[in-house]
Each structure stands twice: as C-alpha cells, then as structure tokens.
Amino acid sequence: MTEREDTKQNTMIQNLRDAGCDEGQIHCFLQFLDDGRCWEALQLLEKHRQVLLERCHEEEYKIDCLDYLTYQMGQKKR
C-alpha cells in the first residue's frame, strides 16, 4: 500500500469513527472493499445511517414531548 493509499484509508476509517461506526463495522466495511464487494459496503453504511436516523427521530419525539409539557404549563399560568 502506498503512502497516499494509506492516508486515504486512514481518512476513511476516521470518517467512519466520526459517523459512530464501531470497530466491527469498520472492519467489515474495509473487508468488503478489499474483496471488491462495494454493494455490501454501501449496504452497511445505509444500515448504519438508518439506525442513526431512527435515534434522531426518537430524540426529536422526546423534545416534542417536552415542548408540549412546557406549553401546557405555560397555559396554566394564564
């Protein structure tokens, strides 16, 4: 592996970590790429994206609940 390829892979690994991928996911992703199985690598990323999006929606729901409670409490003060 050339220095440029090594740097590119390290950047990719850091990006995966920043996206919340664990070491197992990173290993699988890199293995898929090494094996030329780009479709599977993309599927792994899409699955992780869906998990993150679901978490986001769950947290958004919690915020909505707090906003509603705050609104209701504000109505009682009037």
Image: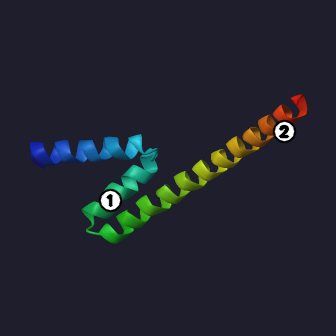
* SS of the residue under disc 1: helix
Asked whether 61 or 14 is in front, the reply is: 61
**Label 2: few (<14), some or many (≥20) within 10 Å?**
few
Which residue position holds label 2? 72
- Taking the spot 32% from the left edge, 41% from the top edge, the residue there is 14
Residue 30 point in image, percent of width and height: 32, 55
In this picture, residue 16 sits left or right of residue 58: left
- Taking the spot 39% from the left edge, 50% from the top edge, the residue there is 26
Q: Quadrant of the C terminus?
A: top right
First-in-chain label (1 vs 2): 1
- Taking the spot 28% from the left edge, 62% from the top edge, the residue there is 33
Asked whether 49 or 71 is in front, the reply is: 71
User: What is the residue that sits farthest to the top in this orientation?
Assistant: 77
Q: How is the image coloured?
A: rainbow
- Which numbered dot is residue 31? 1
* SS of the residue under disc 2: helix
Which amino acid does the dot numbered 1 rest on? Gln
In this picture, residue 19 sits left or right of residue 31: right
CA gap between label 1 and label 2 equals 53 Å
